[in-house]
């Protein structure tokens, strides 16, 4: 019998507009209100405000709606000075006072853990804040060339369209000052239609820039870019697609090639240690919060001579090197070979002999590698947004006495921390790092110790 696909019928619900009073904020900073026997989530609505809203969807007793008209305005609502606020969507919480935004994130994490882990978190032991503007030292800008014009900016919210910008409130002053001349330089290239994006890094000395190309960079364009980089004290690289000219392998490959600037001038500082990087290297975007984070890691781990520490997802050694300088013997592990290679060079340059670095995919079998067999007194985990499912389970089963879990995704953190709870760990301290003010993102840290 042949069966044919039949799209499921859309569930009908009352789509007529209605008035809603906002009583609270969720983890993403959306307004919450109850009406029509359901909880409604509404962007850009503040507690105490009343709005006429249009339902967008409804699942069970929870739905989303959008503001049609604001009927009662909160005196705490902020006006956004950004000229691109209506189109960019990069700062969805810019209408909230900083303290209200941070409280929404904190309360949201606590509600999430109560729901996911049946765990009532106390008030955080620490909460690190940052300036609301000029804090972002690294970013990726999309590039598009059409109808004879080059556009440089951020993707619009939930769209592939580009919001062309001249400056950004959250970027550092040096990056903002660079944008107009960068746009002009890219417009003058013959390969401008082959540029996918541009990465910028405001390091502690020079600025860095990297262009992603879909073809090899033409020689004349390379000369133009080198002159531009010299004029603006830039360390400039290109990530270009290419094919081998010899052999039978005709697959397209990507390489990063430095074309201008002194690579020694591109570095960030972590607890006074110089960490050299590439224009495309991952660096915590908020220097103020990163300094606070490194200080907290040192305080919470309390490294001493003879102590063995694992730093998983270590990157360039942002935590590894300060922990090692403080006396511990530290093994940093990361999946990106270029990062661990640079981290090793940085350790040698700083004269730190108690830090070593290993390249390994921590979401693939790694348990038989030498670092995984060594003794360990403490571990630091700072994974990406997908979390650390496999490595969390491995660390928990090893019963390492103290674990510091840092996460930029509270939902992934709640999943990973379940592995520690099942192995007898308890949260002894926890805190918040507001790494991205004006956005719904939040960084959390949890100290886990066995009963």
Image: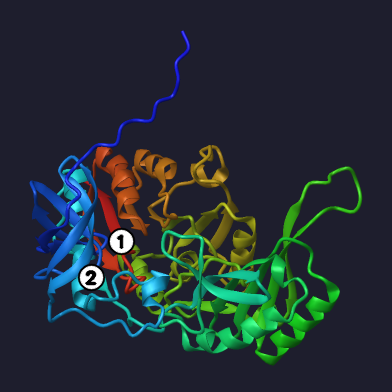
Name which residue lies at 55% across and 37% down: 368
The crowding category of the residue bearing disc 2, from other C-alpha atoms within 10 Å (few below 14, some 14 to 19, many at least 20), is many
Which of these two is toward me, 42 or 422? Answer: 42
The crowding category of the residue bearing disc 1, from other C-alpha atoms within 10 Å (few below 14, some 14 to 19, many at least 20), is many
Q: Nearer the viewer, mark 1 or mark 2?
A: 2
Which of these two is toward me, 29 or 210? Answer: 29
Please name the colour scheme applied to the rendered image.
Answer: rainbow
Secondary structure at badge 1 equals strand
Q: Which residue is mark 1?
A: 444
Secondary structure at badge 2 equals helix
Q: Determine whether 1 is above or below 89 in the image.
A: above
Q: Quadrant of the C terminus?
A: top left
| Residue that sits furthest to the front in the current view | 16
Q: Is residue 148 left or right of residue 374?
A: right
| Residue that sits furthest to the right in the current view | 246
Which of these two is toward me, 69 or 72? Answer: 69
Q: Determine whether 317 is above or below 58 in the image.
A: below
Q: Which residue is mark 2?
A: 102
* Number of numbered callouts drawn: 2
Judge whether residue 401 can be spotted in this image: no
């Amino acid at each position: 019998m042949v069966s044919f696909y039949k799209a499921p019928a859309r569930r009908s619900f009352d789509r007529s507009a209605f008035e809603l009073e906002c009583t609270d904020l969720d983890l993403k900073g959306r307004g919450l209100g109850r009406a029509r026997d359901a909880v409604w989530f509404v962007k850009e609505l503040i507690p105490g405000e009343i709005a006429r809203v249009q339902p967008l969807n409804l699942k069970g007793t929870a739905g989303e709606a959008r503001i049609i008209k604001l009927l009662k305005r909160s005196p705490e609502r902020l006006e956004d000075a950004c000229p691109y606020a209506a189109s960019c969507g990069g700062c969805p919480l810019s209408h909230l006072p900083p303290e209200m935004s941070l409280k929404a994130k904190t309360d949201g994490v606590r509600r999430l853990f109560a729901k996911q882990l049946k765990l009532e978190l106390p008030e955080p032991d620490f909460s690190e804040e940052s300036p609301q503007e000029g804090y972002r030292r690294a970013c990726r800008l999309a590039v598009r060339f059409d109808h004879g014009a080059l556009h440089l900016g951020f993707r619009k919210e939930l769209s592939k369209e580009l919001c062309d910008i001249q400056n950004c409130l959250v970027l550092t002053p040096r990056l903002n000052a660079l944008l107009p001349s960068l746009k002009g330089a890219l417009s003058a290239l013959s390969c401008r239609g082959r540029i996918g994006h541009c990465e910028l890094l405001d390091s502690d000395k020079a600025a860095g820039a990297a262009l992603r190309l879909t073809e090899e960079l033409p020689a004349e364009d390379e000369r133009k870019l080198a002159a531009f980089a010299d004029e603006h004290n830039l360390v400039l690289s290109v990530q270009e697609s290419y094919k081998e000219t010899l052999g039978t392998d005709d697959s397209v490959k990507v390489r990063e090639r430095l074309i201008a600037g002194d690579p020694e001038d591109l570095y960030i500082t972590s607890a006074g240690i110089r960490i050299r990087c590439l224009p495309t290297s991952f660096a915590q975007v908020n220097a103020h919060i990163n300094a606070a984070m490194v200080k907290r890691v040192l305080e919470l781990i309390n490294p001493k001579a003879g102590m063995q520490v694992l730093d998983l997802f270590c990157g360039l050694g942002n935590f590894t090197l300060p922990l090692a300088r403080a006396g511990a013997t530290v093994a940093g592990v990361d999946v990106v070979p270029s990062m661990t290679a640079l981290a090793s060079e940085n350790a040698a340059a700083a004269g730190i002999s108690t830090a070593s670095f290993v390249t390994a995919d921590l979401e693939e079998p790694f348990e038989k590698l030498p670092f995984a067999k060594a003794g360990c007194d403490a571990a630091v985990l700072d994974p990406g947004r997908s979390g650390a499912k496999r490595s969390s389970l491995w660390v928990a089963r090893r019963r390492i006495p103290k674990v510091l879990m840092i996460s930029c995704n509270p939902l992934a953190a709640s999943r990973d921390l379940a592995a520690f709870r099942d192995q007898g760990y308890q949260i002894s301290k926890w805190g918040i790092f507001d790494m991205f003010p004006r956005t719904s993102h939040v960084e959390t840290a949890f100290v886990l110790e066995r009963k």
